[in-house]
Amino acid sequence: MNVKLENLDTDFKEILAKLPSLAQGFGYRIYVVGGVVRDLILANDIFDLDIVVEGDAITLARAFAQNSKKEFKKHHAFGTATVYFDRHSIDFATARKETYSSCGVLPKVYRASLREDLLRRDFTINAMAISLNSSDYGTLIDFYSGLADLEKRVIRVLHKKSFLDDPTRLLRAIRFAQRFSFKIEKNTARLIEEAVKREALQCVHPHRLRDELILILKEPRPEKCIRAINSMMGFSFVDDSLRLIGKDYVIFGRLKNALSFYQKNFPHCRKLDAWVMYLTAMLYKLSSKRVEHFLRIFDFRKGDRVRVLSTFYERTVIQRLSKPQKRHIIYRALNDLSFESIMFFYAFFRNKQIRSSINIFLKTLAHLRLKVKGDDLKGLGIKPHTIYGKILEKLLDDKLDMSLATKDEEMRRAVVIAERLSTEK
Ligand code: CTP
């Protein structure tokens, strides 16, 4: 079978026009491999290319980057290199086989043929290649029946040690099965069960689990993956006590609605990282102490940790908004929270008053700024300057509650506040 490389984005077409002759010059054979081949057959969008080189990948990538005047980065330990284009990148890897000394550790790698390189991969649908060599350009190379499995819509491992060699594949199996609505083939499902019994996920470094988890949460339907993980392997790799039951999934449907509500109504606000909200939902049953522990061990980025944790810390505070409140109280309750936390609460609390407060906040309050600055207070002769912080804080509250629109109105109000503060002393 010939795969239509013409369907690729123009950038890629330019790349593929140059690369084969360059590789030929070095006497190397090159192939497009992995998920890209799967996605080309499924006619999905392609963002990045993976090229396997029977030869030295770093030499080829360097020459290609120089030739195309693009940025190039090599990763010596793995014999791989990346060339960066404006919208895409291309990974070059020397064809290799791998041996694993024990469960979950990174493999030792050796140079190998394309056939061996494909055999070390996770699933048959990800173990196909397309030749970029002049003798058989565009030909699908499918040693392990990946195409048949794509047609049968099944996820199948290539050998029985696959999940023990690399237990992150347990999560990958679920991710691909849910993404494409494929079934996990019977024998593969049995191997998953066996690996779960042997607690294979427990021997993977938390950083690798974190990366897989984030990929899952970034899928279009993360709740489906979360359900499948819960029923097939449980969440003990996240926290011993985390088990989800029927009603715990309600929040995922509500999050989906809240996300489209946000997109439609607040286009001026920044785009949400939905995965952070799904992570919060997945962990919501746990105490904040346990969530803190999990986020630390898995070494999530500080910004992500803060966004998840603030939702846990503030969940009781938000309930204050279930009664009608002045606008400055709404502002103070929500302003230090991320938009992800705020929209999580929007989904979680169905209380009309809370939702209306969030609506007001995101529509107008979040973007309000004072026109008056410290220098203006100085110009008004207000003393001492140590009270400026307090005046501006109070002024902002009044601006929110009294809808002060112009700078003049703010100035007049600032004088009143300053006078009040000086008599209070
Ligand atoms: N791979 C593997 N085992 C893993 C990770 C990756 O065998 N644990 C192989 C697969 O052949 C995979 C390829 O490396 O297709 C590229 O990995 P990655 O980019 O993670 O996977 P994609 O299949 O491209 O997935 P996605 O569509 O989510 O990017």
Image (spheres, rainbow, N blue to C red):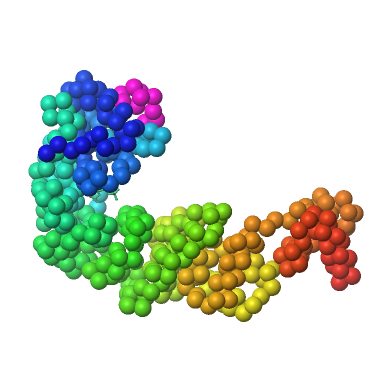
Task: Please report the residue visible at 64 percent of the width from the left and 57 percent of the height from the top.
Answer: 367
Q: Residue furthest top?
A: 25
281 on left or right of 231: right
Q: Position of residue 111 (x, y in %)?
A: 17, 36
Task: Please report the residue visible at 83 percent of the width from the left and 55 percent of the height from the top.
Answer: 408
Q: Is residue 284 above or below residue 100?
A: below
295 on left or right of 125: right
Which quadrant, please, contains the C terminus?
Answer: bottom right
Check residue 64 for magenta coloring. Answer: yes
Q: Is residue 307 visible from the viewing direction of this image?
A: no
Q: Quadrant of residue 156?
A: bottom left
Task: Please report the residue visible at 16 percent of the width from the left and 30 percent of the height from the top.
Answer: 137
Check residue 268 for magenta coloring. Answer: no
Q: Quadrant of residue 399?
A: bottom right
| Viewer-nearest residue: 375 or 195 | 375
| Viewer-nearest residue: 189 or 9 | 9
Q: Position of residue 40 (x, y in %)?
A: 23, 43
**Which residues lie in the magenta part?**
62-75
Which quadrant, please, contains the N terminus?
Answer: top left
Q: Quadrant of residue 66?
A: top left
